Image (spheres, coloured by chain):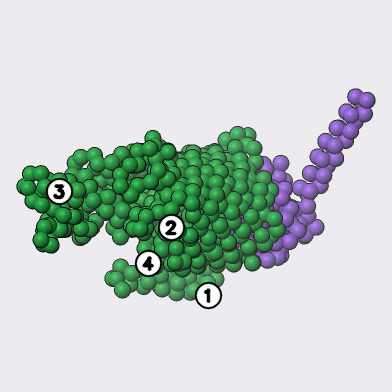
Chain colours: A green, B purple
Amino acid sequence: MKKRQCWFIAGAMILLLFSWWGYAQNLDWIHMHGLVSQGYIVSTDNNYHMNTEDASVEFNEAAINFTAQLTPKLRTGLQLFSRDFGPNGNNDLFLDWGYLDYQWKDYLGLRMGKIKRPAGFYNTMRDIDALRTFVLLPQGVYDESMREFTMSVQGASLYGNLSLSFAGDLEYETYYGISNINPDMTFTQELFSTIANNMGRGMEKRLKAQEKIPVEAVLDPRVRNANNKMRHSEGISLVWNTPLHGLRLGTSRMLGRTEQSATFDFHFLMEGETVKQITTPFESSLKFKALDIFSCEFEWNNLTLAGEYMIMDGEVTVDGEVMQLIKEEAYYAQTSYRLFDWLKAGAYYSVYYPDSDDKKGENLTAPGQKDFMAWQKDICATLRFDLNEFWLVKCEAHLMDGAGQLSTILNPAGVERKWQLYTVKTSIIF
Amino acid sequence: MKKTILYILTGIVFFGAGFSLFAQQDIKVIVQKDMALTEIDRNTFQRIYLGKNKFWKDGSAIVAVHLRGGPAHEVFLKDFINRTDSKFRSYWNWIVFTGRGVPLRSFENEAELIQYVAETPGAIGYVSSETNTDNVKVISVN
């Protein structure tokens, strides 16, 4: 077990004992809550986020949080979190959020520490299964493979809520911070793989053309000393709770820059079955120029309607040169209805384009690429059963068209256009 | 004919208003006796229970408390908060699990809630209209 995990567990145990002592002493200023969830996920034809074709139970979360109102204006708290999501998470324990919060007035407060980033209406709650109808949030806007980029930062935020009297109220938050990103996450590995393949092809050409060396094939490069760090990230979120009860409109913008570094070992298969190794370090950066989300939600009694539109503009730079421009687009519309206290039904239609300038895949001409990798359309239907106040079960089906969000690492044999995904998940919250 | 329609519409409006007033009077909103507050507007009352208003006008902290269930709690949710019980719980779970606040204190019965409000500076709560509230001050919600 890593040293960091030991510290977290030790810290959690101390807080747990402290909370128990507080409970025993009837101290009502310290609060403890938690959740545990476990899912099962299976797909036809393609692997989605994990090895879903063979079915997977590497799909769980557990969290425990503590909050204390130290003075009327000063609050502190933290949440320890563990998740397994296929190759990501692996149930390592980490600090999900933890900060000091000084609220001067209702319209102005300051948080310092590790803070959740508001992006769209549902980013802050994406790990808390019990807070939503669906098992998977619409992946076009809330891509799980991008979670570590969008979830939280270590820094500070200014926030508040301003009453507009007859015009409703306005919630706002702006933040700035940095974060460490696990280099083992699928998204980073995909990025390294793309960069390595590009560099490998360049080297092969150079060996053949300039040095007249006969190369038969480029073998899979090995990645060592991988590092991924978010140098800075900032954002703003505005939510207008309109005077029409249940209707809220919002917009958020996220900016940032991450830097990656690693050492690649390239292996070239030469004539005569010999292998030539070339080792080269590289540095890259992924810059989010803007990740904008526009949101709308309407709640009326047991009915909820929602829709969001996301557009992301960014670029990948390798060794100082722009290698790839990113222009993603996604949107969805969803509805849910509580039929009984114990049963809620929901559905959504979600669309994602990895390149908003090529929605039909006309530019995907490289070997192994198919036009349907230019989109991913998802029709989802869910049933949520609330067995009691603390325990719930969800069953969900997805009809998919396209492979725009599928990992090439998880699907080395290629991808299919039409596929389905099914999942069952249960959660306990207290 | 026009007059008949006018009478019907007027009747509906007055019936609706009367029903609404009747429904609102099913609960009494209470604060500590020492507080100068005598009334509160409906918007502020709702904002308090959604964690958006945390301070009284004099800058002191608001301590909002609620019942865990029962007829008074149902009236409170339906007529003042405009949310179902599950949505109200879900909203507060979101606040708690994203670190945006501490949960509201809740009580199984009205006697305990009244006692807490009576003893706690800045506290606000509600009970059914028939309940004895001699130890606390009843304020109106406009």
**Is disc 1 placed on a helix, strand or loop?**
helix
Q: Amino acid at mark 1?
A: Ala
Mark 2–mark 1 distance (CA, rounded to whole Å): 52 Å
- Camera-side residue of A188 and A50: A50
- Which residue is depicted at the point 50% across and 66% down? A40
Q: In the picture provided, is A80 more to the left or to the right than A203?
A: right
Of callouts 2 and 3, the N-terminal one: 2
**Is disc 2 placed on a helix, strand or loop?**
loop
Q: Is residue B17 visible in the rendered structure shown here?
A: yes
Callouts 2 and 1 in the same chain: yes
Given the image, what chain letter belongs to the residue carrying mark 1? A
Given the image, what chain letter belongs to the residue carrying mark 4? A
Mark 2–mark 3 distance (CA, rounded to whole Å): 32 Å
Q: In the picture provided, is A188 more to the left or to the right than A31?
A: left
The residue wearing badge 3 is A203
**Residue contact at pointers 2 and 3, CB within 8 angstroms:** no
Front tag of 3 and 4? 3
The residue wearing badge 2 is A46
Mark 4–mark 2 distance (CA, rounded to whole Å): 21 Å
Residue density around tag 2, few if under 14, some if 14–19, many if 20 or more, within 10 Å: many
- Camera-side residue of A184 and A350: A350
**Residue contact at pointers 1 and 3, CB within 8 angstroms:** no
Instruction: Please say if A358 is above or below B1.
Output: below
The residue wearing badge 4 is A90
Residue density around tag 1, few if under 14, some if 14–19, many if 20 or more, within 10 Å: few
**Residue contact at pointers 2 and 1, CB within 8 angstroms:** no
**Is disc 3 placed on a helix, strand or loop?**
helix
